Image (cartoon, rainbow, N blue to C red):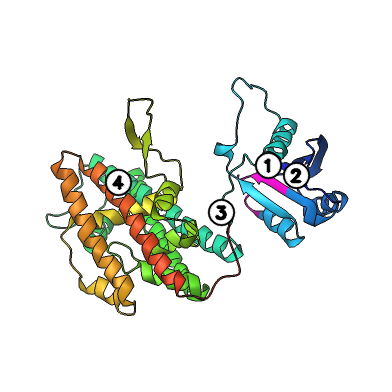
Amino acid sequence: MNRLRFVGFDVHAKSITVAVVEANGEERLLGEIANREEAIHKLVKKLGPVENLRACYEAGPTGYVLYWQLAKWGVRCDVVAPSLTPVKPGDRVKTDRRDARKLARNHRNGDLTRVWVPDGEQEALRDLVRAREAAKKDQTRARHRLSKFLLRQGRRAPEGVRAWTQKYMQWVHSVGFVISAQQVVVDDYVHEVEHSSERLRRLDVAIGEAVQKAPARMRAVIEALQGLRGVAEVTAVTVVSEVGQLSRFAGARQLMGYSGAVASEDSSGERQRRGGITKCGNAHLRRVAVEAAWAYRHRPAVGSTLRRRQAKLSAPVIEIAWKAQQRLCGRYRKLLGRGKNQQQAITAVARELLGFMWAIAVEVESKMPTSHHQPHN
């Protein structure tokens, strides 16, 4: 009779330490192999029938390449959350060998938490969105350097000229300095600002093209999410690329927890104490939700831009989006009335906005053909 064999991989850039735990609890350390496809394939062949193997490794900087390789050879593999791996109190010894053994042992006992693993297309889209996020941060830094330099030199834009508009950049180009070193500095800062803006434009175009080439199911959810106020294409693409299939969550609260936007709690007995949000979740998802939540400070309304985005959406999706406006605007004003500061109110609105995103995604995905790819929770 064949028995399951649990394999733990402690993965690094150049090497992988491997341990095996048999179904009866017997542990064996297999040693270290090179992190190369041929070496991993050779190991898999030695481990026996692939249908009996249950592999796992922790999510990290090496990504999901090992998962995809093992899946290609028919090995069932779980990528697990390192922050949720059980740790014994007082255990101060950490080595690759001990980590591999611990992973295999915990995997056999069912004590590990799987993370969602994107497929190749989803991973590519997520990389593109994160590249844009990095470009946006670089643009902000470049703008700050330029504006603070001009401020130190006492140069201020003419009255009525808003920062970073076309007129503002025309004024910046007209600024001159007598000292050549300062002119070199301002020219370099202006070049970086313009370069970062052009970089953002290229990435925005690339994201639009990637969405058009995405699977129909993914594209439908991205379009539907844009029916929400404050959720344009980049925000919708970020949500889908970071979460994948939103309906994989049993409810809206699970998605909120995945974002790390839920309140922390330290309660015991009759004492109940709740603090700020945990931030134990996907920071990219949480960031775009908070950015979108600022749109709900204003009274419910459907402007020309939002009406254009909703033109091809179904009536149920539009109805959910309108309920979101009414609910979240009221929620924001109620929290301010209770004495909460603006940032606290926006964070609470962002958390509930994720719930409306989940409802829209479930509505759209329920109308689409069932996907053969079932991602992990």
* Mark 1 element type: helix
**Amino acid marked by disc 3:** Trp
Residue plotted at (72% across, 39% down): 104
Q: CA distance from mark 1 to mark 2?
A: 7 Å
Residue 269, picture quadrant: top left
**N-terminal-most mark, 2 or 3:** 2
Which comes sooner in the sequence, label 3 or label 4?
Answer: 3
Closer to the eye: label 3 or 1: 1
Start-end of magenta stretch:
55-64
User: Would you call the spot at circle 2 few (<14 residues within 10 Å), some (14-19), or many (20 or more)?
Assistant: many
What is the x, y in percent for residue 27?
80, 35
Precedes in sequence: disc 4 or disc 2: 2
Secondary structure of the residue carrying numbered label 3: loop
Q: Which residue is mark 1?
A: 107
Of the numbered discs 4 and 1, the one sitting upstream in the chain is 1
Judging depth in this view, the residue of 206 and 154 nearest the camera is 206
Spatial CA span between label 4 and label 1: 36 Å
Residue at the top extreme, as displayed: 90
Asked which secondary structure carries label 2, the reply is strand
Kindly check if marks 1 and 2 are in contact, taking CB atoms under 8 A apart as contact. Answer: yes
Q: Which mark is residue 116?
A: 3
**Which amino acid, mark 4?**
Thr
| x and y, in percent, of residue 140 in the image | 35, 50
Question: At 82% across and 37% down in the image, what residue appears?
Answer: 31
